[in-house]
Image (spheres, helix red, strand yellow):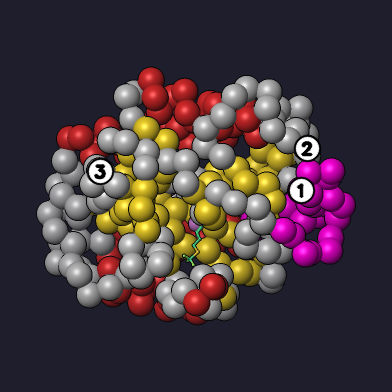
Amino acid sequence: MTKTEPVVNNENRGRMTKDGIRIYEASDFAGMHVAGALAARILDDIAAHVFVGQSTEEIDRIITNMVEAAGAKSATIGYKGYKHASCISVNHVVCHGIPGPKTLKDGDILNIDVTVIVDGWFGDTSRMYVAGKLPRKAERLIQVTHDSLMKGIEAVRPGKTFGDIGHAIQAYVEAHRMSVVRDFCGHGLGRVFHAPPNVLHYGRPGTGAMLEEGMFFTIEPMVNLGRPETKTLADDWTAVTRDKSLSAQFEHSVGVTADGCEIFTLSPAGRFHPTYD
Ligand code: MF3
Ligand code: CO
Ligand code: CO
């Protein structure tokens, strides 16, 4: 996810809307599908390596090897100085957790976020995992976060707006007395990692840019059990909840079709959720 601030797209392909959002060609969906499927398969396969006593840097090392074995490239290694193939965000870490030597404890929940580049196309997805036994309140948080992403995706079709997506997510989360993070958002992607628009996970129906067939973007709500505010640690990456409450996130990359959308990052094994089986 990107910081909620303006981004530019220098790429030169398809056409651009007045809001600066690229419209890709029908033939471009195939490349996104391949990249998205690889990122999703890596998230399927990493589940076996998440357990009590495992370090997040070991998980990242395995992901690095998986990306390489597939003949793909990591989009995050070297991105704005980031050095890892994944972000691993444990418990109250909202996003951009840096893999490190700390080991997972029983009941820890974690988001693993992977972005790969295949033939120049970006596939960006994340989902939740648990080490050991899943605590009850974490289970609720994970379920609501997952379902809020799916509510957002259901709102994707030509003629709807980005505000409709944000509203669907926010309404669902707040009905469950949880909060949506405002400081980070989803993003356009395609031949680039982060492009317009900022895909907010809150908003009002009918506001924002209109969705058009051929737009590619991520939806990646971060949901907190407590308040929505975040702060970034001294490492300049790790974002945590200010009130130390638990946070969860799920992310898909999607492309707008004539009557809805294609989810590029569907799990080949049907394991996007739950991952704690
Ligand atoms: N994959 C993240 C996203 O969803 C971005 C991570 S950038 C990194 O947009 F540098 F922190 F890896
Ligand atoms: Co993203
Ligand atoms: Co991501």
| Mark sitting earlier along the chain (2/1) | 1
The reply to whether dot 2 and dot 3 touch (C-beta < 8 Å) is no
The reply to whether dot 2 and dot 1 touch (C-beta < 8 Å) is yes
Q: Residues within 10 Å of mark 3 (few under 14, many from 20)?
A: some
| Mark sitting earlier along the chain (2/3) | 2
Q: Please name whichever residue, 204 or 83, is drawn nearer the observer in this view of the structure.
A: 204
Q: Position of residue 44 (x, y in %)?
A: 40, 57
Q: Amino acid at mark 1?
A: Ile
Q: Position of residue 3 (x, y in %)?
A: 52, 54
| Mark sitting earlier along the chain (1/3) | 1
| Up-down relation of residue 204 to residue 92 (above or below) | above
What residue is shown with label 2?
A: 212
Q: CA distance from mark 1 to mark 3?
A: 35 Å
Residue 263: in sight, yes or no? no
Callout 3 secondary element: loop
Q: Amino acid at mark 3?
A: Asp
Callout 2 secondary element: loop
Mark 2 or 1, closer to the camera: 1
Magenta residues, as a range?
Answer: 8-34
Q: Residue at x 75, y 33 (%)?
A: 210
Which of the 4 quarters of the picture holds residue 65? bottom left
Q: Which mark is residue 243?
A: 3
What residue is shown with label 1?
A: 21
Which of the 4 quarters of the picture holds residue 120? bottom right
Q: Amino acid at mark 2?
A: Glu
Mark 1 or 3, closer to the camera: 3
| Up-down relation of residue 160 to residue 230 (above or below) | above
Q: Residues within 10 Å of mark 2 (few under 14, many from 20)?
A: many
Residue 10: in sight, yes or no? yes
- Pointer 2 residue Cβ closer than 8 Å to ligand 2: no
Q: How many marks?
A: 3
